[in-house]
Image (cartoon, rainbow, N blue to C red):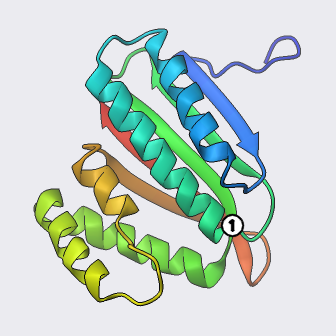
Amino acid sequence: MTGMIGYEGGTKGFLDITFGPKWDYIPLTRNYIENFLQVNYTDKLSINKIAMSASELLENAVKYSSKDGIRTQIRKYEDEHKIELVVYNVIDKIEADKLMKYIAELNSASDPFLFYVAKMKESIKRHDGKSGLGLSRIAHEGSAKLEAAYFSETSDTGIIEVKALFKI
């Protein structure tokens, strides 16, 4: 790192935003991400997919965060044809385990659309007020591959990193 600002080496574009878990910040962040992506990309469909996915991941982060500090990063590497959208937040270990299991199930599905439809049917039967569709929507409508990693801080909580990878 040179100087005061550490820029992600090897990237064509980099964005890093951190905010407290507040619902009102999600649409503002989504709009900012859309504008940021429009600097280097003209493909509106790809921009909309990434912005929608950011919104879904941020909604999950606000919903399940156990502390302040939701961090969002976007990276476009110079030598690769992909964009990474990464969201970090503090989460209870039990919720992190559920999330990682869900993402593994989603990634093992042979068809993201059929998985999404199955989750829509399941959501009709839910009585907890949650649809559970955000991640499957990212995989199907956003055409993204999801990854997650959990970093333990205490025996009960840690940081979850959820990454959506987009081919461009």
Image spot of residue 14 (x, y percent): 59, 22
The quadrant of the image that shows the C terminus is top left
Which residue is situated farthest in the right direction here?
4
Location of residue 28 by image quarter: top right
In terms of depth relative to the viewer, which is nearer, 77 or 106?
A: 106
What amino acid is at disc 1? Answer: Ser
- Residue at 70%, 18% (x, y): give it: 7
Does 8 appear above or below 21?
A: above
The quadrant of the image that shows the N terminus is top right
Image spot of residue 58 (x, y percent): 57, 52
Position of residue 114 in the picture relative to residue 27 (left or right): left
Position of residue 11 in the picture relative to residue 81 (left or right): right
Does 125 appear above or below 159?
A: below
Position of residue 22 in the picture relative to residue 96 (left or right): right
Q: Which residue is mark 1?
A: 65
Location of residue 81 by image quarter: top left
- Residue at 64%, 53% (x, y): give it: 88
Image spot of residue 150 (x, y percent): 59, 66
Query: Is residue 160 in view from this perspective?
Result: no
Does 70 appear above or below 165?
A: below
